[in-house]
């Protein structure tokens, strides 16, 4: 989820007001595409807080699919489902998870109290179930009739990947693995730690992972410990980065850095280029900074915290690093300011109608730091060859009701064995299934 940093002097005002006067001057679409509009920063004493109250789906309501598509509930009654992984036999794994306890969660502080109120309003304050649930649709009717707890008592699990005879799981503090064969519905073996991950404060707690096409490496995403390094860069060691982990040896190295909060990862159409969806920084106004999707270069630096979208310097960061700014890579495709773009899935294997044939699906969890709100939907970015081509298209909308309340919030996206799109909704506690309209 995007950074939530509340200034102590303004805590009470932030909890009483849904927004503080600063509003967007541009439509969300202006901050999308390969060349987004980047107006001057609009910093305010009190950052904009415009959180959508989480209410869930009432009276059979559900999100609205694009023309030519249909949506049904694949599974419901889950506990904060965040991430999805489809096994080779068609079983679907869902991480029911939330943030681990943090030092600032200790009782007694006004900042913790106010932050807790805002997070609760957004539906993000539930205690983590710390489990991975297996869903099975054996009769292929689009509804999972079997639900079993595959793993439990984990530590805020998120990313999952099957490599050989092991299921790898990214906890908030480590990558662990378990012996596993598709078809199993429960794992009793203890976890084997593969490698530690930066933890502690865990300002951004989600740790995702994806296996290389040949299964020899894992790529592990780790978000930053702050908005823009305001707590010092010493606690950012190894963070705001994607790590490459050698499966055989357990050795790891930094693959790419300067990525504030990379979450979703997917292999592009060429099968060898890694792509990621990244949450950018807050508190520069409703029009800045666009989240983005980008191909990831080995050894590449993407600007955080010193600059954004290439060489646009963030003057809040001290000391400045012009040497690193000069190296900052411009992302491939902006996804709109504050959309909290988390989920990412390539369309390969999907059996959806045109125009949802060749491109990336993106789950946009939704803004807290923009007026009016942005995100709260699933979009599709069309590709031509190996690059994004053309404006993004809505796939699933209606997560906000007419009162501006969050009926749901999309997170992870994945393509199931029948070629439909699965969407994890951590406020509605549903896995939605999007297919072709009959």
Image (cartoon, rainbow, N blue to C red):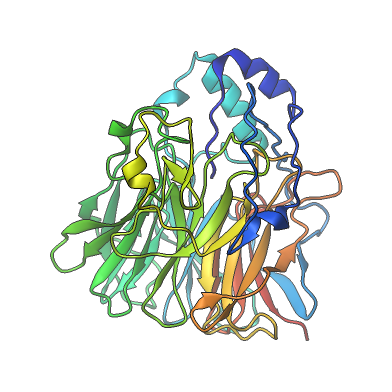
Q: Is residue 110 above or below residue 171?
A: above
Screen quadrant of the C terminus: bottom right
Kindly tell me whether residue 411 is visible in this rendering: no
Residue 237 locus on image (x, y percent): 27, 40
Residue 17 locus on image (x, y percent): 74, 24
Residue 78 locus on image (x, y percent): 58, 55
274 or 170, which is in the foreground? 274
Q: Is residue 159 above or below residue 119?
A: below
Q: Quadrant of residue 343?
A: bottom right
Residue at image coords 39%, 64%: 296
Q: How many marks?
A: 0
Residue at image coords 56%, 52%: 291
264 or 62, which is in the foreground? 264
126 or 263, which is in the foreground? 263
Residue at image coords 54%, 19%: 111
Residue 88 locus on image (x, y percent): 41, 81
Q: Quadrant of residue 425?
A: bottom right
Left or right position of 375 against 3: right
Q: Is residue 277 above or below residue 323?
A: below
Kindly tell me whether residue 57 is visible in this rendering: yes
């Amino acid at each position: 989820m995007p950074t939530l940093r509340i200034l102590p002097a303004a805590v009470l005002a932030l909890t009483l007001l849904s927004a503080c006067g600063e509003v967007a001057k541009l439509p969300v679409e202006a901050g999308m595409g390969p060349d987004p509009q980047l107006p001057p920063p609009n910093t305010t004493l009190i950052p904009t807080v415009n959180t959508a109250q989480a209410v869930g789906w009432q009276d059979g309501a559900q999100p609205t699919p694009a023309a030519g598509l249909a949506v049904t509930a694949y599974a419901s009654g889950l506990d904060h489902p965040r991430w999805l992984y489809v096994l080779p036999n068609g079983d679907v794994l869902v991480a029911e998870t939330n943030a681990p306890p943090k030092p600032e969660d200790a009782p007694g502080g006004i900042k913790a109290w106010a932050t807790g109120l805002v997070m609760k309003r957004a539906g993000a304050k539930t205690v983590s179930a710390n489990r991975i649930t297996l869903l099975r649709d054996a009769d292929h009717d689009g509804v999972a009739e079997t639900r079993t707890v595959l793993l439990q008592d984990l530590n805020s699990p998120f990313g999952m990947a099957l490599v050989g005879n092991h299921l790898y799981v990214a906890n908030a503090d480590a990558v662990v693995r378990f012996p596993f064969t598709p078809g199993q519905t429960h794992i009793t073996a203890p976890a084997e730690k593969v490698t530690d991950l930066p933890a502690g404060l865990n300002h951004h707690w989600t740790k995702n992972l994806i296996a290389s096409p040949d299964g020899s490496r894992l790529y592990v995403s780790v978000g930053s410990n702050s908005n823009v390094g305001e707590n010092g860069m010493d606690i950012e060691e190894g963070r705001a980065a994607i790590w490459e982990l050698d499966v055989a040896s357990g050795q790891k190295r930094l693959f790419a850095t300067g990525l504030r909060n990379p979450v979703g990862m997917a292999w592009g159409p060429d099968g060898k280029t890694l792509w990621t969806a990244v949450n950018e920084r807050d508190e520069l106004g409703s029009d800045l900074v666009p989240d983005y999707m980008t191909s990831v270069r080995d050894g590449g630096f993407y600007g955080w915290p010193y600059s954004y979208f290439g060489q646009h310097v963030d003057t809040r960061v001290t000391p400045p690093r012009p040497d690193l700014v000069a190296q900052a890579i411009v992302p491939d495709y902006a996804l709109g300011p504050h959309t909290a773009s988390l989920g990412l899935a390539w369309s390969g294997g999907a059996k959806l109608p045109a125009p949802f044939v060749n491109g990336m699906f993106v789950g946009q969890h939704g803004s807290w730091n923009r007026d009016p709100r942005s995100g709260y939907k699933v979009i599709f970015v069309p590709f031509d060859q190996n690059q994004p081509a053309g404006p993004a298209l809505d796939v699933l909308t209606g997560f906000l009701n007419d009162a501006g309340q969050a009926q749901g919030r999309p997170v992870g996206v994945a393509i199931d064995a029948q070629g439909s799109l699965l969407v994890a909704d951590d406020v509605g506690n549903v896995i939605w299934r999007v297919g072709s309209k009959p």
